[in-house]
Image (cartoon, rainbow, N blue to C red):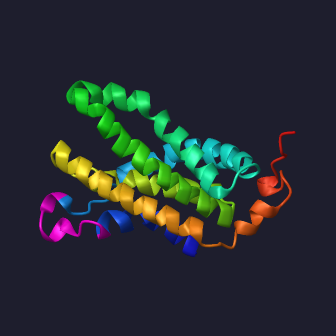
Amino acid sequence: MRWYAVALLTTPLFAILWPLSAIVAPTFAPRFQWALFGVGLVAGGFEEIGWTGFATPRLLARRRAGMAGLFLGLVWAFRHLLVDFRYNFEAMRMVWPLEFAVVYIATLTPYRILMTWVCMNTRSVLLAVLMHASYTGWLLVLFPATSLTQSLFWQTAFAVMLWLAAALVLRRPSPGAEAQDLPPGTLFGVPAKR
């Protein structure tokens, strides 16, 4: 049950605790979107079959969880490059690379490290799907209706919190850590590439 809490509450916990600005500014008031959560379940379901069900076990058979999560997080962030470019470059122009770096690279990479940690401890694609859906469902909290400058500040602070959480979980031995000591190919029953 605690892993379901980690999967579903990581994003809202950091998104709400960081600013606590709902007291000061209504624009930062948490507003979970069930429609986005539904989109996250569907999109996350399909994506996590690939990210967590296919790529993660193969990376974990060869790499430590931190490196596997870091690599997969960067790939996951850059997978959003063309979509973000298409929808945001026209409006942002010269600021777009900074927006992409902060919103996607700086946040999705540590979030994937956390997802890899959950995966190592549960071996559950379902929890990865829920974690992905939770992130998507809280997007309006992560992107409050503010100026670009405020949004970049908000996202940078959120990214710092995610990186701190990722560093914390990677420093502590976890119950799933012994999975890295198994012979290659035993995690999720995936045969190692020879």
Q: Identify whether 61 is placed above or below 77.
A: below
Q: Identify whether 173 is placed above or below 161.
A: below
Q: What residue is drawn where x is 50% and y is 42%?
A: 43
Write down the quadrant of residue 120 in the picture: bottom right
Front residue of 43 and 97: 97
Q: What residue is drawn where x is 55% and y is 55%?
A: 113
Q: Is residue 62 left or right of residue 157?
A: right
Question: Tag count in the figure?
Answer: 0
Per the image, is 19 magenta? Answer: yes
Residue 151 seen from this side = yes
Q: How far from the left and from the top, in percent, is residue 31? A: 27, 60
Write down the quadrant of residue 126 in the picture: bottom right
Front residue of 23 and 34: 23
Q: Is residue 178 left or right of residue 98?
A: right
Residue 145 seen from this side = no
Q: How far from the left and from the top, in percent, is residue 181? A: 80, 63
Q: How far from the left and from the top, in percent, is residue 59? A: 70, 47
Q: Quadrant of the N terminus?
A: bottom right
Q: How far from the left and from the top, in percent, is residue 146? A: 16, 49
Q: Is residue 64 left or right of residue 3?
A: right
The magenta-colored residue range is 17-27
Per the image, is 49 magenta? Answer: no
Q: Quadrant of the C terminus?
A: top right
